[in-house]
Every structure is written in structure tokens, then in C-alpha cells.
Amino acid sequence: MSEVPVEAPAEPTVSELLEITKVREAFPEGLLKVKEYRGETYLCITKDSLVGVATLLKTDSDLEYSYFCECVGVDYSRWDHERDLEGRFEVVYNLRSLKHHSRIFLKVGVDDGETVPTLKHLYLGAEYPEREINDLFGVIFAGNEQVGRFLLPDDWVGHPLRKEYPLGGDDVRFDGGSTGPAVEDMMMPHAGESFHGRTGSEGVSGR
């Protein structure tokens, strides 16, 4: 008598994830889109719902996304393909549940002149990544405004991770009208650099 193969239970779909169900029920107007990409789940939400959604994910006993991994900025001003959100910039938050060993991403869209509410009061680890995004992209985080630059000199002009910023061939501009050397003017060989069969280390390491 041949055995009848037993099919394995189907993997849960994105719409069946508990995180999505809870966020949709609590913030029906705040959840704009759910996306799954390469095994990761992204919740595209409004800026106004960001703090509430993050608080729910962190404090709900069934979820406990208590670990803030990072947040990053993206400039889509020169992107001609399909987008998840409106607005020139996106801020993407990477949260992890140590209880369930799961990860979820939150995405918000923002335009020039708009603000994103800070998460530093909910996640202490959010303060410096938000300040870095502010310095390099110009995105303002309400409640985490900085005085002066964060990574760059105080008299640096512009935000170097914006798409319109020179890639390194132009002189760096400062607010007093002066300029500094271009990035390519400051480049020098380093140990291990290879060209024409040489390592390039002789003049650097002294060997």
C-alpha cells in the first residue's frame, strides 16, 4: 500500500503576520502599504503615525520590537522607477524583536521643508542616526534638532548625500565663500593598492 504524501503547511503570507494585523487595526489611516522584499517585511506608514506605530511594535507583549538596529535616509530625486511612498526622501527604520528573533522595517516619506518626528525618546539608539541623516541629507527630525553640524565642519555648505551634490571632482564649498580641495586632490596610495604590478605600499608603509 503506497503512502499518500502529506503536504507541508503553507508559509504564512505577509497579510497574515501579527505585526501587520495589529498595526492596521490600531492605525488604519497610517498604514499606507505593506511590502515584502527578499524575505523582509516593510511597513510604509505616514509620518504622523510613526511614533505610534513604533511604540506599538516595541511595547506590545506579542511583538516586543525592542531593539533599534538603525535608520537610514534615501534621496529619490533622481529615481524614475516605481516608488513605495511619495516625497523626495525616505527614512527607513530597522527594528528587531529579540524575543521572537524577527525583523521589521518602517518607511516614511518626507519632502524638503517637512519634518519627521524623532524616535529618540522611544529608542535611545535613534538619536545619532537621525542626526547623521539630518547632516548628510537635510531631513529634519522634530524633537532631535541639532545645533551646528554633526559629522561635517560647522561651515560646510549643503548636504553631501543629496543627488545634486558633486561626486568629488569639485572643490568643497564653505559658508565664508572659501573652498577646500576636491576629494580627488586629497587621494593618496595606500598599502595593498595595486597598479602596474606594484603594491603601492613602498611610499606609504616605509617597507
Image (spheres, rainbow, N blue to C red):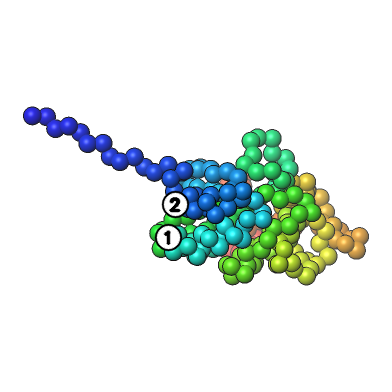
Location of residue 70 with respect to 45 vertically, above or below: below
- Image quadrant in which the N terminus is located: top left
Q: Nearer the viewer, residue 86 or 182?
A: 86
Location of residue 80 with respect to 129 vertically, above or below: above
Q: Which residue is mark 2?
A: 18
Near mark 2 (Cα within 10 A), the count class, few <14, some 14-19 or many ≥20, is few
- Residue furthest to the right in view is 177
Q: Can residue 193 be seen by looking at this rendering?
A: no
Q: Secondary structure at mark 2?
A: helix
Q: Residue at x 63, y 67 (%)?
A: 120
Location of residue 61 with respect to 1 vertically, above or below: below
Q: Residue at x 54, y 44 (%)?
A: 34
Q: Amino acid at mark 2?
A: Leu
Q: Residue at x 81, y 62 (%)?
A: 156
Q: Nearer the viewer, residue 67 or 19?
A: 19
Across and down, in percent, residue 191 comes to 59, 59
Q: Amino acid at mark 1?
A: Asp
Give the left or right position of residue 67, taking residue 141 as reference.
Answer: left
Question: Separation of disc 2 and disc 1 at Cα?
Answer: 8 Å
- Image quadrant in which the C terminus is located: bottom right
Q: Which mark is residue 62?
A: 1
Across and down, in percent, residue 149 comes to 76, 66
Across and down, in percent, residue 83 comes to 64, 39
Across and down, in percent, residue 86 comes to 69, 43
Q: Which mark is residue 21?
A: none
Circle 2/circle 1 CB separation < 8 Å: yes
Q: Residue at x 52, y 51 (%)?
A: 25
- Residue furthest to the left in view is 1
Could you tell me how many numbered marks the image carries?
2
Say which label, 2 or 1, has the lower sequence index.
2
